[in-house]
Amino acid sequence: MAVSGFEGFEKRLELQFFGDDPLQNMGLRLIDFESIEQVLRAVNCTVVSAVGNHFFDAYVLSESSLFVYPNKIIIKTCGTTQLLKSVRPLIHFADKLNLALCECRYTRGSFIFPKSQPFPHTNFKEEVIYIEENLPNNLVYRKATVMPSKNPSYSWHVFTAADQNHHRRRSRNSDVTFEVCMTELDRHMARRFFKKTGDCKTGDLAGKEMTELTGIDDINPSAFICDFAFDPCGYSMNGIDGDRYSTIHVTPEDGYSYASFECVGSVYDDDVDIVETLKKAVQVFKPATVSISTTSNSREVWTKVARAMEPLGLKCRTFAMDEFPAAGSVVFQTFTAATRRK
């Protein structure tokens, strides 16, 4: 393990708003690009590529991704970004659109290089204090938990908050969100996320090549992919499929190689099995260790996850489950390969 390197493990923030029926209007999508850049400057990252459809806008960032729906914002950043510094300005810009915050969810894994993280991300207690100081008083239902694993390096940190009217909303929600963290990637696959010496392709063109070369485009063939390759290595992509997103981020350096995959779906999907999509993503990277957080109200989903990992040679080592205001059930599972790959 390297003494220091790029921190692949992301911090993820989801803010849900309500107002004059934003689902029928543009809502948060009316926040202008200059204001979005202002938020990202506070976080310490920038936009490198963007795409949108009828439902939402997706931005590939210099450190991960941003998704803007009419009534919610999801921002996910890696490295030494200060993600939580986005909370206050996002609430401010939403307020200008007569939208009020009703839910907040913050999640992350355990950092590979925790001592490199700046305030307020020095530890989870500090993060929770910072979030709570910046949330409006109406979000009265709050909970912070560290979901453990046998290996403390793979714990899952969750904070949620909701107001009086929304803390039970998710009990009727069929959505499923997978947050997947993979380490010790297959070395042959990881090398495909390095740009070749002398390669003068743009990040967009090089990213498209990596998407095709690695089979990422086969994970969900119906998704439109916005991808980007970094110099000299690293890769990010956002997938857009109707009103649902998926995202992948890769830090391929040997010694602290890491990839993440996140997607959303519904337990009622008949045409696309979201667990099969998850399996395809993990299969691309062939990691030695995988942690999967499943947010859903369906018990069937997380039991399918363990079964899906078995054919990949990944055995479930840890299982933890907890209930959170608004978010519903969060199940955290860790898996390790039966044999180490060289």
Image: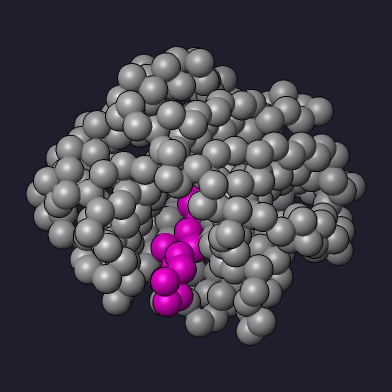
Q: Count the numbered circles shown.
A: 0
Magenta stretch encompasses residue 148: no
Percent coordinates x, y for residue 25 in the rendering: 22, 68
Percent coordinates x, y for residue 64 in the rendering: 40, 48
Identify the residue at horizontal 30%, vertical 34% (top origin).
87
Magenta stretch encompasses residue 243: yes
Horizontal arrangement in the rendering, residue 263 relative to residue 53 (left or right): right
Identify the residue at horizontal 30%, vertical 29% (top origin).
136
Q: Nearer the viewer, residue 297 or 335?
A: 297
Identify the residue at horizontal 28%, vertical 35% (top origin).
86
Q: Nearer the viewer, residue 202 or 65?
A: 65
Q: Nearer the viewer, residue 24 or 193?
A: 24
**Chain part drawn in magenta:** 238-256
Name the image quarter holding residue 198. bottom left
Q: Is residue 207 visible?
A: no
Please say which color scheme the image uses.
one colour
Looking at this rendering, what residue extends furthest in the front direction? 164
Q: Is residue 168 above or below residue 41?
A: below
Q: Is residue 55 visible?
A: yes
